[in-house]
Amino acid sequence: MPDLCDQCSAIINKHHELPPQITEPFKFGYGKYTLYEDADAFLASVRAGCVICKRIHGEAHSKWWERLARDMKQKVSISKSAWFHMQYALVPSEGALRVEFEVKGGLIDMHHFRHLRIPLRIVATADAFDAARGADLATDTGPGPAWSIARGWLQTCLESHRSCGHDKGDFLPTRLLYIGTGPGDPARLCYTKYLKSRVQYISLSHRWGNIQIFRLLRENRLELEKKLPLDRLPKTFLDAMEVTRCLGAEYIWIDSLCIVQDDQSDWRYEAARMGDVYRYSWCNVAATGFEDSKRGMLVERDSRVVAPLYIRRHYRYKKSLLPFAVQSMPTAGGNTFDPPAKFRSHAQEQARRTAIFPNGDYVCFDERFWDRGITLAPLMGRGWVFQERLLSPRTLHFGADQLFWECREAESCEAFPNGLPRDFHRSATYKSERAADALGRVTDESSRKTALDAWNAVLLSYTSAELTKQCDRLPALSGVAKDMQNVLESRYLAGLWEAALLYQLLWRLEQPDRLGIETSGAPSWTWASTAGTVVGNNLVPSHELAERTLAELIEANVQPLDDEMGEVEAGSVTISATMIHLIPTPKRFDPREIGQKLEDVLSPWIFFWPYGTRDYTKYSAESQKPRGVEIDPIIHQDRSQKLDEVYLLPIVNHDGTVKGLVVVPIDPENLDGPWKRCGMFEFKPGAKGAENIDALIAEQDKMEGGHRTIQLI
C-alpha cells in the first residue's frame, strides 16, 4: 500500500462501513462522504506524506492553502466567515471506479474562495498494469532514469513506427547550433549549406515569456559562428543542449539563435520555413510546463505523487450483506436501476459499495494528468507552438512534474512508460486535443468535408492561443496550411479555402470581447483580421446546398507579403447578393441616435427596410418606427460599427436557418465602392419574422439597389 493517511486509507478499505451522508449527492444515487473538515489537519497530512492528499494539495497554489489555514484560525466578522470542507464520492465509471474529491474553502464572501474537483481513476484491468509496468520515477527529471526512458521512446519510434517518418528527405534549416557530443565541445552557430552531409537535429519549443533572452542579431552573427556564449544563454537552452546530446544528436535548432531577430527579411524567410523546421526534425524537445526559459526545464519532485498508486483491497464480506448487492428497483419502462442512497437501508448501502469496489489489486491515477501536464500547460498557450506540436513527427515534453512523449503512433509518460492505458480518457472539452485528433485523421484520400472539419478544429484551437504580434496570425499557422493544401488541392486565401470560400466567410468569434482589435494588412473578411477564438462554418459545397445558396462568389484574390501561406498585404472578395439595410433601434426609437454602436442597443429587435433608402425622414411620426417588417436575427459582431451603416448579406439558407455576413460600406455615401465585413448573422426558425424571411429576401431582390455586386476588402 502507498503512504496514505487514515482518512484516505479508509476510502479503500473501510468505505463500505461509513455511515451514508445523502446531502448534496455528487451524482444521482452516489452521496458525498467527508474526508476533512479542518484545513490544518489536511495540511498536516500533506506534510506527513499522504500521497492522495499531496495530489489534492497540488491542484491549487500553496499560498492559497496557507491563506486558507490562516483564515480558519483568525476571528472573522459576521460578514466574512471562513469555511473548509473536503468530501469525496465513489462513482462507477465506464468499467472502472472514480474517486471524486471536492474541496471548498476560503472566506465565503471574498474572491479567494476556491472550489476544486479532483477525479482519481481506479482500474483493475491488465492493460493498466501493463502500461505502468517498468515505471522508474526518480526524484527529478534530469539525467538518469527519466532520460533513459526518453531514449527508449525515441529508439522504439525510430525502429518500429512507420507513420512517424524516419527518412524525411534532404531538408535542413538555414542555420543550426552545433553542440558536439560532450559539454567540453565548443558550441557555435553554423550554416547548413556548408555541411558535407545531412545531419540529424533536435528542435526546441519554448516560451519566451517576459524575460530578455540572448538572441542572434546582425551585430553578433560573426561572433556566434565562432562560439556561443553559454554563460549568457537561459537555463532552458542549456538543458535542451544536454538533452540533445543524450538523444544522440549533435545539432539543435532554437528560434532566437537561428533566426536573425533584427533582420525583417530574414525573419520572414525563416517564418515561411518554420513548419518544415519542425516537420523534418529528428525529435522536438518542448519545455511544456514552464512560463519562460529562465529557470530551465528540469525539476525536482516527489515521485510518489507522480507515479500511479498500486492499491490492494482486502475485506472479509459479511454473508448477510451479499444479497443486498444485487437488489434493484423497477422503472416504468421495465428496466432496473440502482436505488438512490436515500431509499436504501444502511445494510443495503454497505452491500452496494462493496459490490462496486470488490477485493483485488488496482491501479489508481489522476484522471486529468494529461490535460494538466500537456493540454493546459503554459507552453500550449503560445500560438506558434500549436503548429510546432502538430507538425513534429515526435515530441518529448518536459512537464512540470514528469516527461511526456507524443508521436504519430504512441503517447506515453513516465508514469505509464509503455503507453497510456485504454481506461484513460482525455477530456473532450480541450480544444488542442480535438485539433490534433482531427488533423491526424486527414489523409490524401480524405473527403473534402473531413478535411474542412479538421481545418475548423485547427482554427478553434489555434486561435485560442496567444500571439505577441497579431500580424503573426497567418505566418504561425502556415506550416499546417501547407499540409492541408496537399489534401484539399485548393487555393489558400488568407486563412480560408477557395473550394468552400463562400461558406467559410461565415466564421464568427466564439466570445467577441475584443471588438475593434484588427490585424494590419489582413482583409476584413478573414478571421486573421481579428483577435480572439474563431469558430469556423462547417458547410461544404454540394448540389443540395447549391440550391439553397443565396449569393454568388464572383472573384477572390490576395496579395501575399512573401509566403503565399503567410502574411498578406491586401485581399478582396467580390460577391453578388441581396442587400438588406438594417436599422437597429433601442426600445424607444429615436432617429437622432442612429450613430449608436451595436453593443449599446438595449433591444434586440431590428427592422427590415424593404425600400433600400437611407432617408430617415420617412419614419411614421406616430410610432417612430421605420416602414417595413420587424425581424430578429442573431448577430455575431467582430468589430465595432455604427448602426446606420449596417447591411445584411444573406449567403445560404441551411435547414431553415439563413446565414450571411454583416457588412458596411467604407464610404457610407458611396454604396458602389468597397465594403468591409463587421460580423455574421443567423436567422433561425422561430425567430421574429422567420415566417416571412424568404419572401422578404425575394422582394428586396426585385427592388432597385436591392441586389448588388460588392467588393469586400
Image (cartoon, rainbow, N blue to C red):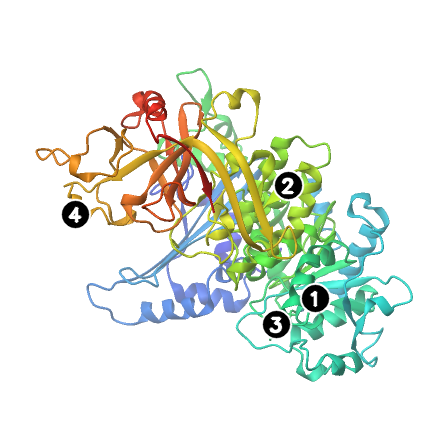
Query: In this figure, which residue is indicated by the disc labeled 2?
Result: 491
Q: Position of residue 389 (x, y in %)?
A: 66, 54
Left or right: 69 with respect to 532?
left
How far apart are the two marked residues, 2 and 3, measured between alpha carbons? 38 Å
Labels 3 and 1: the sequence-earlier one: 1
Q: Earlier in the sequence, mark 4 or mark 1?
A: 1
Badges 4 and 1: C-beta atoms under 8 Å apart? no
Tell me the distance, in whole angstroms, between the alpha carbons under discs 2 and 4.
Answer: 46 Å
Q: CA gap, disc 3 to disc 1? A: 23 Å
Three-letter amino acid code at the position of disc 3 = Ser
First in residue order: circle 2 vs circle 3: 3
Q: Residue at x 69, y 37 (%)?
A: 489
Furthest residue to the left?
622
Residue bearing mark 3: 293
Q: Tell me the mark number nearer the camera, choosing from 4 and 1.
A: 4
Q: CA distance from mark 2 to mark 1?
A: 51 Å
Question: Which numbered disc, 4 or 3, marks the residue that appears first in the sequence?
Answer: 3
Q: Badge 1 local density, few (<14 within 10 Å), some, or many (20+)?
A: some
The one nearer the camera, 511 or 58, is 511
Secondary structure at badge 1 equals loop
Instruction: Label 2: state its secondary structure.
Output: loop
Q: Is residue 416 left or right of residue 624?
A: right
Question: Which is nearer the eye, 554 or 549?
Answer: 554
Question: Which x, y percent locates residue 374?
Answer: 60, 55
Between disc 2 and disc 1, the foreground one is 2
Q: Which residue is mark 4?
A: 592
Q: Is residue 506 depicted above or below 78 in this figure? A: above
Q: Which residue is mark 1?
A: 138
Mark nearest the camera among 3 and 1 is 3
